[in-house]
Amino acid sequence: MDEKKIIVIGDFVDPKENERFDLSSTLRLKAKSIDQKRLWASKDRSAEFMGDIWSLFVDSEKEERIKTVLHSVCVELIENSVKYGFQDQDYTIVTDLYLKNDELLVYVINKSDPSQMPELETSASQILGTDNIRKLFKQKMKEAKAAKKQGKSKSQLGYIRILMQNVRLAWRIELGSESAFVTTLARIPLTKKDA
């Protein structure tokens, strides 16, 4: 039997512990139901669709924030799920959205290779531990350019772009010897950030 280890990074809120939500929805993408190129293209349409639908359920002041930020967050998280998911398995990428008071919680659940988890832990801790997100963004841009020259693609810029929009991130990793289930949480405040 595969024994599981739970790793939590950041301020993770378990939706099962508090089910008092004003609204919720789920989107499931089967990775093997469509080819990789179509899945990459569909992530943007799926995220745009969710932003458009969810904007209908909030007052007009919050509508544009939901459309733009939710779209951006979902694109980045679904893209990571595709990039780091099991390429040879029929896994499902699940996106759960919950509206609670003035906060939208976006959970993206993905099945991944356990060998990739140390890199995720290191990246997440670095991103959450920085006191200057813009400086880290510039640093990661330089690293991404250098990696691209070597034929690699591991920038972590997506997570940083999410944080730059006043969105908080957290992770819950259920780690087994054969697979890891990664739940990434993006907490989107719907009130405007104080100037």
Image: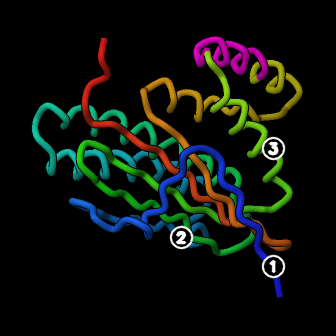
Q: Give the labeled residue for mark 2.
A: 30
Instruction: State which region is magenta.
Output: 132-143
Q: Is residue 69 left or right of residue 76?
A: left
| Badge 3 density bin: few <14, some 14–19, many ≥20, Cα 10 Å | few
Q: Residues within 10 Å of mark 2 (few under 14, many from 20)?
A: few
| Quadrant in the picture for residue 173 | bottom right
Pick the front one: 144 or 88: 144
Q: Are marks 1 and 2 in contact (CB under 8 Å)?
A: no
Quadrant the N terminus occupies: bottom right
Mark 3 or mark 1: name the one nearer the start of the chain: 1
The number of callouts visible is 3
**Relative to 39, is 18 on the left or the right?**
left
Q: Nearer the viewer's eye, disc 1 or disc 2?
A: 1
Q: Is residue 20 above or below residue 144?
A: below
Q: What type is the residue that disc 1 sits on?
A: Glu
Q: CA distance from mark 3 to mark 1?
A: 21 Å
Pick whichever, 29 or 160, lies toward us: 160
Three-letter amino acid code at the position of disc 2: Lys
Q: Quadrant of the C terminus?
A: top left
Residue displayed at 50% across by 32% down: 162
Which element carries disc 3, helix, strand or loop? helix
Label 1: which secondary element: loop
Q: Which mark is residue 3?
A: 1
Q: Say the numbered circle drawn on residue 119.
A: 3
Per the image, is 98 magenta? no
- Residue at the spot x=79%, y=62% of the render? 113
